[in-house]
Amino acid sequence: MLEFSLALTLCFIVLFEVTYLCFEEYRKRSYPAGRKGVILPPGSLGLPIVGETLDFARKKVNFFREKHLRYGRIFKTHLFGKPLIRVYGAENVSRIILGENTIVQSSYPRSIKALMGPNGLIQSQGHTHKTRKAILMKFLSKEFLENHIPAFRQAIIRRIKLWCERSCVDIYKESRLLFVELSVRFLIDINVTEEHILGIKNELDIITENLFVLPIYFPGFGYYKAFEAKRRLKALLYQILQNMGKSSKSQQSVLEAYGTCIERDANLKVNNELLDSIFELLFTGSESISTAGFTLMYMLAKYPNIMKNIRESLTTQQELPESPSFAKTEMTYIDAVVKETLRILPPVGGAFRTILQDFELEGYTLPKGWSVAFSIRETHHNDTHIQNPMTFDPKRWLTSDEHVHYSYIPFGGGKRICPGQAYSKTLLKIMVTQLARCCHIDIVQDGELDLWPSPRPKSTILAHFSLTRMLNQRI
Ligand code: HEM
């Protein structure tokens, strides 16, 4: 009898959910139709509820490419249960970025929101977002980073030495390990053990692999695996934070900043909110930068002339990355290599927003309640302000004035601009400098790249690192 009532209740819940989804679907699809003057962007909303998600899952990046080729810079579709408008191009992107909190609001797919939890920066809005971000930006600023440059440099050199001792190296995997290590040491504690770093990296890997999945919390499903990995990771962080306190004051600062910001107990008492925030920072702080580290190493190995140019461009001053001038703003050849790699292979392909009120782009209405995504990758590859966009040419940033606002946006812009921009550029520059000064990189096993959700090898890419000069040597 009990089983029968349970089954009946379950049926009722499922029926209710399906009816609700159908109603929501109908409401969203029909919302703008029939209203005078409303012209929706071209494209198709596909099947009810699933929309065009299945087609997208099959084609990934080619899905967007094909649609943009067919419809131009703006089209409508229906992905992950929501109608979506996708745009690219400096003018469209700037309208969306600058419209934060007025016409649009930052939003992430449901699976990411649930994983990150409500306590972090990415889900906060308005005043809370502004305060948290200001504090974080201060501790990730160039000035603050300069104190840490010698420590970063040592950690990078140590990894490069290990790569040179091996016959070949999986550059994607090693880049992840390097940047997870740097994030953990910088954001949490310099003294974290190698074993803990490996543990954190393994859990982050599971989360990354299961980020864009159906939100089904049941053993065996990707969503469940990601949540379990987050639970284990938080337990690991708890252990590390409990044992902390012996590390240097400057190393505690990022943590302190976040702790204060969420009104943590003054003497480093670890609570769930703090763990969620540290988790978000660790995740965002190692995900995109390790992709950038991988693509940079790949480009350096693929284009030996770029390595040669970097070596030639290194003056004695620039060879010492711990010198303050390293973090200055003038464009050097190394800056240009980093910048061009982030342009041609942006680690974050685009960003999502929820539309708060109807507005127009290119003569089309973007209706309230729908999602809009601006594409960073398509803007970098197709924007008319950039000449020969598919050519990898770092020199373009030295010789011409190609930078038109919002045609180059690897870190986004406006209120939601990436707070890790200075941190990432500094670390990537140190890595490139050390590699160019002391190493020769040969690809031993090449392969194609997948661009969704971020650039990564379809199958393992192996490289051989050989020392051409002693690391750690100042000349
Ligand atoms: C090459 C490396 C990186 C790239 C290309 C990158 C890219 C981006 C982009 C495009 C956004 C904006 C998303 C949007 O507009 O919705 C963003 C946001 C964010 N990034 Fe990064 N990121 C990188 C490294 C980092 C690092 C190292 C950290 C942390 C230390 C970090 C933390 C964040 C956070 C917390 C946000 C959300 C900001 C907000 O909502 O206000 N990122 N990132």
Image (spheres, rainbow, N blue to C red):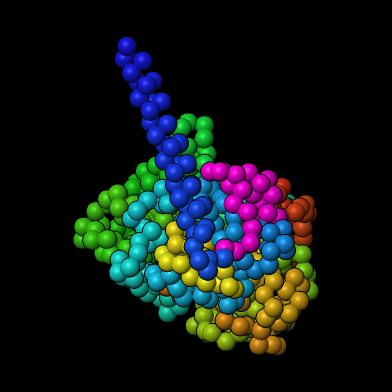
Q: Position of residue 302 (x, y in %)?
A: 77, 64
Give the quadrant of residue 88: bottom right
Q: Nearer the viewer, residue 376 or 400?
A: 376
Visible in this render: residue 104? no
Q: Is residue 14 shown above or below 87?
A: above
Nearest the eye: 27 or 94: 27
In the picture, the quarter occupied by the N terminus is: top left
Q: Quadrant of residue 433?
A: bottom right
Residue drawn at 45 percent across, 36 percent down? 18
Range drawn in magenta = 40-63
Q: Residue furthest top?
A: 1
- In the image, 299 versus 80, the foreground residue is 80
Q: Residue at x 56, y 43 (%)?
A: 48
Relative to 106, 39 lies left or right: right
Q: Is residue 189 left or right of residue 207?
A: left
Whether residue 142 can be seen here? yes
The image position of residue 321, as x and y in percent, is 56, 77
Q: Residue at x 39, y 69 (%)?
A: 101
